[in-house]
Amino acid sequence: MRAALHLLELGGVVLAETLARTLTGPAVGRVARAAGRAWYRLDGRRRRRALENLRVAFPALAPSQREDLARRAMGQLLQVPLEVMTSSRFLPTLEVMRRQVQQHGDWEAFHADVARGAGGIVVAAHLGSWEVAARALLLAGVPARAVMRPLDNPWLNQRIVGSRGGDGRVIGKRGAARQVLSTVRERRWAALLADQNAGRKGVFVPFFGLPASTHALPAMLALRLRCPLYATACLRAARGPWTYDLHYRRILPGGRGPSTGAAPQVDEVLAAVSAAIECWVRLAPEQYNWVHRRWRTRPPGEAPGTQVPAYALED
């Protein structure tokens, strides 16, 4: 029965990919927006979660503004799988990628680190099109591996792995710390999504003014290995369909640095990553994944407050 269900899922994905590849560049966004409006209407649980997150992040917005923002954000979130299915057609080569994607921030430092053969860590968020960012690294020849939770369906999992460049470009989430260590020691780059609730074992750092439990792994490993650590975000641009702004911020430069001065602590590094992500979310709030329960886990002993989302109080 499980194999049959997996086969049906695979057939559905193949059909969706076939239909997606018939779309024009502008149509990809239109389909995602229409699907997002339907998702917003039909999925009350995630709609309420998105609205609650937006209340925490943007308390000055009117309820109608938050509703419009949540609706658009759900459409933008559905655009990600469509971009995965069609990016090889609309962003087929490095030359096309360079025309369509503008780089900002510490991008020169990043490419200099890559050119000198340094390994490092790149952290991103569920913001904009993180899959296009991964394709940009692939086309640019950056020796990178991305941490990915394997899908339950082995056929779908292999299909996703193939779209990311094969097994050599993916790190399984189980045992990820060891694989990230070996990746960086081999002078390659490890890419992680680092903006989801980390539970009781996470480190609490500010995100839109409210402590959020955050996975410590990228900061811990970067400090241990003394390797460069970058935060990045790939935002959809208004210049036209399939145009993006790829932002970089160097959090840690790597190397041993000066002999004087205290080394940064894990929580300081994570706070810097969180601040970078928040900055980019503010640039394009409709492109963030607001349906995730980012503030679900609360710090021990935290006093109740109106800013704490309702879903955290229910746990």
Image (tube, helix red, strand yellow):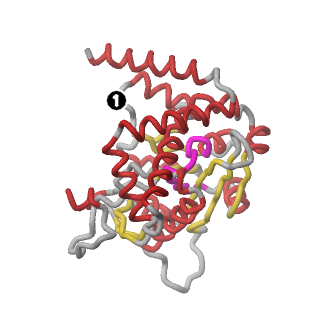
Q: Verify whether residue 129 appears in magenta.
A: yes
Q: Position of residue 297 (x, y in %)?
A: 28, 61
Q: Residues within 10 Å of mark 1 (few under 14, many from 20)?
A: few
Q: Verify whether residue 200 appears in magenta.
A: no
Q: Nearer the viewer, residue 208 or 74?
A: 74
Image: 92 above or below 217 = above
Quarter of the image containing the C terminus? Answer: bottom left
Q: Which amino acid, by three-letter code, is at mark 1?
A: Asp
Q: Nearer the viewer, residue 213 or 33?
A: 33
Residue 172 falls left or right of residue 27: left
Q: Position of residue 129 (x, y in %)?
A: 57, 45
What span is in magenta?
119-133
Image: 159 above or below 8 = below
Quarter of the image containing the N terminus? Answer: top left
Q: Residue at x 68, y 27 (%)?
A: 24
Residue 161 falls left or right of residue 86: left
Q: Position of residue 177 (x, y in %)?
A: 40, 52
Q: Residue at x 58, y 49 (%)?
A: 188
- Image mark count: 1
Report helix, strand or loop for mark 1: loop
Q: Residue at x 68, y 48 (%)?
A: 244
Q: Nearer the viewer, residue 24 or 70?
A: 70
Q: Position of residue 182 (x, y in %)?
A: 48, 49
Image: 27 above or below 229 = above
Instruction: Judge whether residue 121 can be spotted in this image.
Output: no
Q: Residue at x 39, y 49 (%)?
A: 291
Residue with the mark numbered 1: 152
Instruction: Judge whether residue 304 can be spotted in this image.
Output: yes
